Amino acid sequence: MAESLPAPKPLEPEGVYLCPVCRHGQIAPMVLMETYACNFCRHILSLDTTRQTARLEDTAMIFRWQWTGTTWRSLNTPPVTLTYTAIVLGVLLMTLPPLLIWLGQQIFPPLSGDRWQWFPLFWVGLTFLAHAVLVLRIFAGLVPLRPLLGGDRRR
Ligand SMILES: [Zn+2]
């Protein structure tokens, strides 16, 4: 059974939340201030509870995050989606390195009767597997998991 996700809760003025900057410490209200501070990275943030957003206040650059109910989503970069270009690049990254090794094995075949004759093809398969894991791991970060896990069926 998969571990259940924490229940979504709205951003509240007195709440303690994970820091959107370092994602390690917790932000809590500062005494006598309308701002919040992280207990790990010491950044100062302001929260907009009506828009459910946080804004970094101790820098000249504008950094904002949207509270999703369980975690922060950056508003500074557009959401990354799985495009056809990314899929083509992923397929090339999975197939080109094993193809190069296979080509080397075809051009310079191992000596017949050698007990390591199986190794080049094993290496081709291992290279494909390693690159496939790498590409699928990157794509897994781009695809939202909630619809796949059936998290929205309740609505
Ligand atoms: Zn922090």
Image: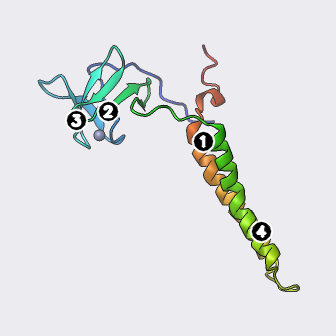
Residue beneath label 4, please?
A: 102
Identify which amino acid the numbered label 2 is placed on.
Phe
Kindly indicate whether the residue at mark 1 contacts the one at mark 3 (C-beta within 8 angstroms): no
Q: Nearer the viewer, residue 110 or 9?
A: 110
Q: Is mark 2 within 8 Å of ligand 1?
A: no
Q: Where residue 73 sits in the image (x, y, percent)?
A: 43, 30
Residue lying at 60% horizontally and 41% vertically, measured from the top left: 140
| SS for dot 3 | loop
Other-residue count near label 4 (Cα within 10 Å), few / some / many at <14 / 14–19 / ≥20: some
Residue lying at 41% horizontally and 20% vertically, measured from the top left: 9
Residue beneath label 2, please?
A: 63
Q: Earlier in the sequence, mark 3 or mark 1?
A: 3
Q: Earlier in the sequence, mark 4 or mark 3?
A: 3
Identify which amino acid the numbered label 4 is placed on.
Trp
Q: Earlier in the sequence, mark 1 or mark 2?
A: 2
- 39 to 32, vertically: above or below: below
Identify which amino acid the numbered label 1 is placed on.
Ala
Other-residue count near label 3 (Cα within 10 Å), few / some / many at <14 / 14–19 / ≥20: few
Q: Which mark is residue 140?
A: 1
Q: Earlier in the sequence, mark 4 or mark 2?
A: 2
Q: Where residue 145 sits in the image (x, y, percent)?
A: 60, 33
Q: Where residue 91 sits in the image (x, y, percent)?
A: 70, 50
- Please state which of the two labelled residues, at mark 3 or mark 1, is closer to the viewer: 3
| SS for dot 2 | loop
| SS for dot 4 | helix
